[in-house]
Image (tube, rainbow, N blue to C red):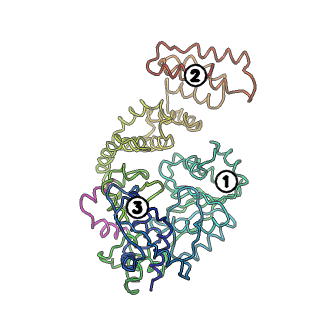
């Protein structure tokens, strides 16, 4: 007799093709952590069902490399032809092949969510009237709950899911929602384009968005709520007064029966209830639970349980790696991380969570506990070590991570190195740099060099409000330059002309060339489509280009010549 738990495992494995059976590289979804995550249960709950399925020749296991899960091979599971046949012949819902609804973006990979029926009904009711903010403590199951909500909504509407982080701005979130679409940059135009759209738009971890970018994201959300048919679902650690047009729904502890189901069927129900109550019906605490752990005497403090039981069971080296990882600002690829060689162990222990394309980070509850135990000196030392780690990496995001850690460990080097690369911002995620510099200003005050860097980044991002705010903290050539830039961004041509000679006075030949090419390009583009260039405009452009001193420019000369040729 195949149990319900075994049928759920078969149904999960049945979604994956037979071709994986001979692949060297396989998806994490058919490893023990991936199966447990997909079915929403504790990993230890799978041991007996998997053994029985294997004994019945309904599944088999082998060793293979899990993509994005480190260099070591892991044990993975496949359903056998007999197992697939059993599902087809079975009369239960597990045998019915259901095409999974598509959610655009990067939602968590979870097939089944236990419990929460009443909460889902309430939220669906709210969404009929307005957008929604789901809040709750770390690890309580907010993302899984909203995913279950969206799986129902996706039967009728398009659902788009973005996960925010410390470096996110509104444009990176929009780009995740509408990955294959060309969208405008400014908020007004975005809202205009989406005004007749009735998609469900999700932002997970919205509480992580930095102070640097939260105002513009707030503006986007407010205008979408007012001017379009979309429904937004924000997921946040705490409720927020920032999003006044959304109805807040606080997600509390999971019900007792569902928590017991997470622990599997092989343990006596009274023992499971005792474990659940001791861990405060907290889903992540249950997932962190191992049979060899002592059950806490009370549910008063999940944080103490994580600290005294979960983390206490690690080796000193593993504890150190957890501390190091807790200071990383955003998700990263496992192969490039500081714990690349240990990632399989941390994954097996459910200490990390995964995003799209093999990106991972510490579970938020683990991260918060680990960070809280570090002194300022310890943090600075870890930031210094992580800066050195990311300095030699060549992966996407490595430069931004390097500057983040450098800003927290060596401010003078951070300012000098970023200043040297400020003219190559196209090679960076400017949303990340804007956050890093803004955080540095918050921690160190309105130091002129930092304010100047922030203004230069704002120039690249076409954010005149940031530059205008910073003018009072600048002086001399930096003040003049930013006044000139602000006039450019605001289209005040006469003001630009009046300041040009003074701005160019102390610039290098290359810096002059860049300014003059930008002015020439803007002048050329400042006309109606399909209209010819007037003689007056042509002379103005020629005047800009004549001032470029090519013989004084070094290795960048060829790119300047190409730019001049394109304008001509």
Q: Which residues are magenta?
A: 303-324
Secondary structure beneath label 3: helix
First-in-chain label (3 vs 2):
3
Res 299 visible = no
Farthest residue to the left: give it: 316
First-in-chain label (1 vs 2):
1
Secondary structure beneath label 2: helix
Q: Disc 1 vs disc 2: which is toward the camera?
A: 2
Name the spot of residue 3 as percent of width and height, x first.
45, 83
Write down the residue under mark 2. Answer: 517
Task: Name above or below for residue 156 compared with residue 476.
Answer: below
Query: In the image, is residue 312 part of the stretch drawn in magenta?
Result: yes
Of 548 and 211, which appears nearest the observer?
548
Secondary structure beneath label 1: helix
Q: Which mark is residue 22?
A: 3
Category of crowding for the residue at label 2, using alpha-carbon neighbours closer than 10 angstroms: few (below 14), some (14–19), many (at least 20): many
Write down the residue under mark 1. Answer: 224
């Amino acid at each position: 007799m195949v149990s319900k738990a075994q049928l759920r495992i078969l149904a999960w494995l049945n979604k994956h093709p037979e071709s994986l059976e001979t692949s060297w590289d396989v998806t994490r979804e058919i490893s023990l952590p991936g199966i447990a995550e997909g079915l929403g249960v504790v990993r230890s709950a799978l041991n007996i069902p998997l053994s029985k399925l294997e004994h019945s020749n309904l599944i088999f296991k082998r060793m293979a490399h899990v993509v994005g899960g480190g260099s070591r091979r892991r044990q993975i599971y496949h359903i056998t032809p007999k197992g697939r046949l059993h599902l087809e012949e079975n009369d239960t819902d597990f045998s019915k092949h259901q095409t999974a609804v598509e959610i655009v973006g990067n939602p968590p990979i979870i097939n089944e969510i236990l419990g929460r029926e009443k909460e889902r009904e309430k939220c669906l009711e709210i969404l009929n009237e307005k957008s929604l903010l789901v809040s709750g403590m770390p690890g309580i199951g907010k993302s899984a709950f909203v995913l279950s909500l969206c799986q129902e909504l996706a039967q009728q509407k398009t659902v788009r899911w973005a996960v925010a982080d410390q470096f996110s701005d509104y444009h990176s979130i929009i780009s995740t929602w509408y990955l294959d679409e060309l969208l405008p940059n400014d908020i007004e135009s975005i809202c205009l384009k989406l005004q007749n759209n009735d998609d469900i738009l999700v932002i997970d971890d919205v509480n992580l968005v930095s102070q640097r970018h939260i105002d513009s994201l707030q503006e986007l959300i407010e205008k979408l709520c007012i001017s379009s048919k979309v429904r937004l679902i924000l997921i946040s650690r705490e409720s927020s007064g920032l999003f006044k047009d959304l109805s807040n729904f606080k997600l509390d502890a999971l019900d007792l029966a569902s928590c017991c189901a997470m622990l599997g069927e092989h343990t006596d129900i009274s023992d499971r209830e005792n474990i659940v109550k001791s861990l405060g019906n907290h889903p992540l605490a249950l997932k962190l639970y191992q049979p060899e752990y002592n059950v806490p005497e009370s549910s008063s403090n999940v944080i103490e349980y994580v600290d005294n039981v979960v983390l206490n069971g690690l080796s000193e080296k593993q504890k150190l790696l957890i501390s190091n990882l807790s200071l990383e600002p955003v998700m990263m690829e496992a192969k490039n991380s500081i714990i690349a060689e240990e990632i399989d162990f941390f994954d097996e222990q459910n200490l990390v969570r995964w995003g799209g394309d093999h990106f991972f980070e510490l579970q938020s509850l683990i991260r918060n506990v680990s960070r809280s135990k570090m002194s300022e000196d310890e943090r600075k030392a870890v930031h210094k070590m992580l800066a050195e780690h990311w300095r030699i990496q060549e992966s996407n995001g490595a430069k931004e991570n390097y500057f983040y850690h450098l800003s927290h460990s060596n401010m003078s080097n951070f300012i000098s190195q970023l200043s040297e690369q400020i003219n190559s911002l196209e090679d960076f995620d400017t949303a990340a740099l804007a956050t890093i510099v803004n955080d540095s200003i918050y921690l160190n005050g309105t130091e002129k060099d930092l304010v100047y860097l922030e203004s230069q980044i704002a120039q690249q991002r076409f954010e005149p409000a940031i530059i205008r705010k910073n003018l009072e903290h600048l002086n001399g050539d930096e003040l003049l330059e930013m006044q000139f830039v602000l006039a450019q961004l605001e289209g005040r041509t006469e003001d630009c002309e009046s300041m040009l000679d003074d701005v160019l006075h102390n610039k290098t030949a290359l810096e002059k060339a860049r300014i003059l090419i930008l002015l020439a390009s803007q002048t050329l583009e400042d006309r109606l489509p399909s209209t010819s260039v007037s003689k007056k405009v042509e002379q103005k452009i020629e005047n800009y280009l004549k001032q470029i001193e090519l013989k004084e420019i070094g290795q960048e000369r060829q790119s300047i010549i190409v730019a001049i040729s394109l304008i001509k």
